[in-house]
């Protein structure tokens, strides 16, 4: 289809009050200073066809505005065009009128005509779409739409369609025979999936071999009798702790009975004290002071007992930490020994099966495994060293706490001694003062003394609370259980050391088999990339053969050697994104020429800002150039050398 614009008539559209132009289907140049209305002419033509302006907007202000920026009332907007389609002339007309009801503006309506035949808006748009779809029109009239409006994948699809059938690269018969009906991309995915699975399987083998070898190096052939003896000793100590716990629970009932008896005695003592106090007369304040002194001494004594208890618990905790530290230090020494053996061990340079010298890539794999093994040993050593340092730090902290507790205990003993000395002195004075009174002091009352003696005996028998004693036993039990677990692990590894030797041989054979399979897949993948490179050259040649000026980069070389699909227009080696406005316009015209030829469709091409294009414009269809020119105050049409002022 060949469409040419013969005439266009514009009335009251945006800033144009009236404009008529006769192009006769020929190329033309419209000149005027900026702001006179050159682009508005193109907006009007696009509104007539598609209800949009040159920026692609549907909701633009198409009616003229007054000084207050409001639409001028009472105007009818008109755009009409005479177009020639393959030698047949048609007249398209669209009017935008006010809808007035009872003298009031109620909105606007659009009237459409084809060859003076009234059409509904929907019928008019269907007519235009049958002539040329909007997307096709935009593709053939916008110099930037192909490179800026389309996604690069859509641009690539259009170019491949234009290029037609592409020749198959030569020399890849073996690769193509492996496809078995699959596309090259699908086969690459199959190979990548196989390689991923095999690589995962291979990578899982090396750690398993290393783990088995570590077990063999550490425990194979070593005497486990000392470990068994240490485990049995730890079990006996754990059983002793369990018996202590059981004895405590068994004695708790009797202990509770004693606590009940103690509470009864304290109640009796208090009652007896109150009896004696009722006879105190004038020495009550002395008795109160005496009671206060006794209470203070009791509190000091309690502080000493508490400090001794905390000191004992902290000493037990330090003993447990030191035991764990010794175990981890033994483990660290073993790891250091293992690192020295692996580091000093030289790797074989010949194949264990055929005796041939291993190729460089195989030696690299062997050395890599050794480095991985050394790295794993270092990681274990660092972890164990961190545990040793942590336990040392913890032991140091506990030692500091022990020192503080000892100082606290010494201070408490001094305060107790001072308190007892004061009590001896002051109570003697109080007793002397009270001796002149007939009141009997509890310290002199046989009943109080008897009750007090019973209280002291029961308090000694009751001892510390059950929870405190159980906490000490539980701490020691957990340490013993951890020690036994460690001995069990050592013995279990020693039992498996002999079984692991045969398993290591099986895993090494499997690892070599998988390595060969991966190498075969790598060869096929490399062949695919080579095919891609050859194919990309053929595709780019086929595409670029369709254009006069523009060249398209259809593939991008990746750092890993592969090819990635792309689509970037270039002019003289300069990418489209780096080109000037004029270069981009020339590229757009070249692309439109090719697309028009491919689709067999030619429509008028309106080039705005044509004055910025210094390259010669070669367009196969009707070309209308919009040129900004200073001091030209009216729209001026230059058609084949004939200049008309409008």
Image: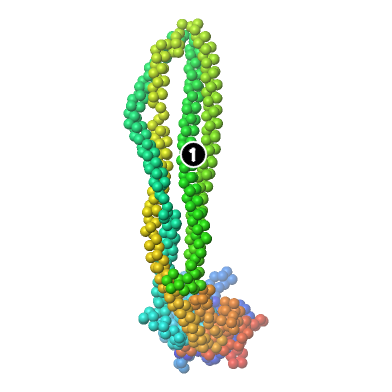
- Residue furthest to the right in view is 631
SS under mark 1:
helix
Report x, y in % for residue 416: 52, 23
Residue at image position (53%, 82%) is 552
Answer left or right for 338 relative to 470: right
Report x, y in % for residue 168: 44, 86
Q: Work out whether 372 lies above or below 321.
A: below
Q: Decide which of 456, 552 is in the foreground and name it.
A: 456
Residue at image position (48%, 22%) is 298
Answer left or right for 6 relative to 609: left
Q: Quadrant of the C terminus?
A: bottom right
Q: Decide which of 16, 419 is in the foreground and name it.
A: 419
Q: Decide which of 245, 33 is in the foreground and name it.
A: 245
Q: Work out whether 369 lies above or below 14.
A: above
Which picture quadrant has residue 643?
Answer: bottom right
User: Can you identify the residue that label 1 sits on?
Assistant: 318
| Residue 262 seen | yes
């Amino acid at each position: 289809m060949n469409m040419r614009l013969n005439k266009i008539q514009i009335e009251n559209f945006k800033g144009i009050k009236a404009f008529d132009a006769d192009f006769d289907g020929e190329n033309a140049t419209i000149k005027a200073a900026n702001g006179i209305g050159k682009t508005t002419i193109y907006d009007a033509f696009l509104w007539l066809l598609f209800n949009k302006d040159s920026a692609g907007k549907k909701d633009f202000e198409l009616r003229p505005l007054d000084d207050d920026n409001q639409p001028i009332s009472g105007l009818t907007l008109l755009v009409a065009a005479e177009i020639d389609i393959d030698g047949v002339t048609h007249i398209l007309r669209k009017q935008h009128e006010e809808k007035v009801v009872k003298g009031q503006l109620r909105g606007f309506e659009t009237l459409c005509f084809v060859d003076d035949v009234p059409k509904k808006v929907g019928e008019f748009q269907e007519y235009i779409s049958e002539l040329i779809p909007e997307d096709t029109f935009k593709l053939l009239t916008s110099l930037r739409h192909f490179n800026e409006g389309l996604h690069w994948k859509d641009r690539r699809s259009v170019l491949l369609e234009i290029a037609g059938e592409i020749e198959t690269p030569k020399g890849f018969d073996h690769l193509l025979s492996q496809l078995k009906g699959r596309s090259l991309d699908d086969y690459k995915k199959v190979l990548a999936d196989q390689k991923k699975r095999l690589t995962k399987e291979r990578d899982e083998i090396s750690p398993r071999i290393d783990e088995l070898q570590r077990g063999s190096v550490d425990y194979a052939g070593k005497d486990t009798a000392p470990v068994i003896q240490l485990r049995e000793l730890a079990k006996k100590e754990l059983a002793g702790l369990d018996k202590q716990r059981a004895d405590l629970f068994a004695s708790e009932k009797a202990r509770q009975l004693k606590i009940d008896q103690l509470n009864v005695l304290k109640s009796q003592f208090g009652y007896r004290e109150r009896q004696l106090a009722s006879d105190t007369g004038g020495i009550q304040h002395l008795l109160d002071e005496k009671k206060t002194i006794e209470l203070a001494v009791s509190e000091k004594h309690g502080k000493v007992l508490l400090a001794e208890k905390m000191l004992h618990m902290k000493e037990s905790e330090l003993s447990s930490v030191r035991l764990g530290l010794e175990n981890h230090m033994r483990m660290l020494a073993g790891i250091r020994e293992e690192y020295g053996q692996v580091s000093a061990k030289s790797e074989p340079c010949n194949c264990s099966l055929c005796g041939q010298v291993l190729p460089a890539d195989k030696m690299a794999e062997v050395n890599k495994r050794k480095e991985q093994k050394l790295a794993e040993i270092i990681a274990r050593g660092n972890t164990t060293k961190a545990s040793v340092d942590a336990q040392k730090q913890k032991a140091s902290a506990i030692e500091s706490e022990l020192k503080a507790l000892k100082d606290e205990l010494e201070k408490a003993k001094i305060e107790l001694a001072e308190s007892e000395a004061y009590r001896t002195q002051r109570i003697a004075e109080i007793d002397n003062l009270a001796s002149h009174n007939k009141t009997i002091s509890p310290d002199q009352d046989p009943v109080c003394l008897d009750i007090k003696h019973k209280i002291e005996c029961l308090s000694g028998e009751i001892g510390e609370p059950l929870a405190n004693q159980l906490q000490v036993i539980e701490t020691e039990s957990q340490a013993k259980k951890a020690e036994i677990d460690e001995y069990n692990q050592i013995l279990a590894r020693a039992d498996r050391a002999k079984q692991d030797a045969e398993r290591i041989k099986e895993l090494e054979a499997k690892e070599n088999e998988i390595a060969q399979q991966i190498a075969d897949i790598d060869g096929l993948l490399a062949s695919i990339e080579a095919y891609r490179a050859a194919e990309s050259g053929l595709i780019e040649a086929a595409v670029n053969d369709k254009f006069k000026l523009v060249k398209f980069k259809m593939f991008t070389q990746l750092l890993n050697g592969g090819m990635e699909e792309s689509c970037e227009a270039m002019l003289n080696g300069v990418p489209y994104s780096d080109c000037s406005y004029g270069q981009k316009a020339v590229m757009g015209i070249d692309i439109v020429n090719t697309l028009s030829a491919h689709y067999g469709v030619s429509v008028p091409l309106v080039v705005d800002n044509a004055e910025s294009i210094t390259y010669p414009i070669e367009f196969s269809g009707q070309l209308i150039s919009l040129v900004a020119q200073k001091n030209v105050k009216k729209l001026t049409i230059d058609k084949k050398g004939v200049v008309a002022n409008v």
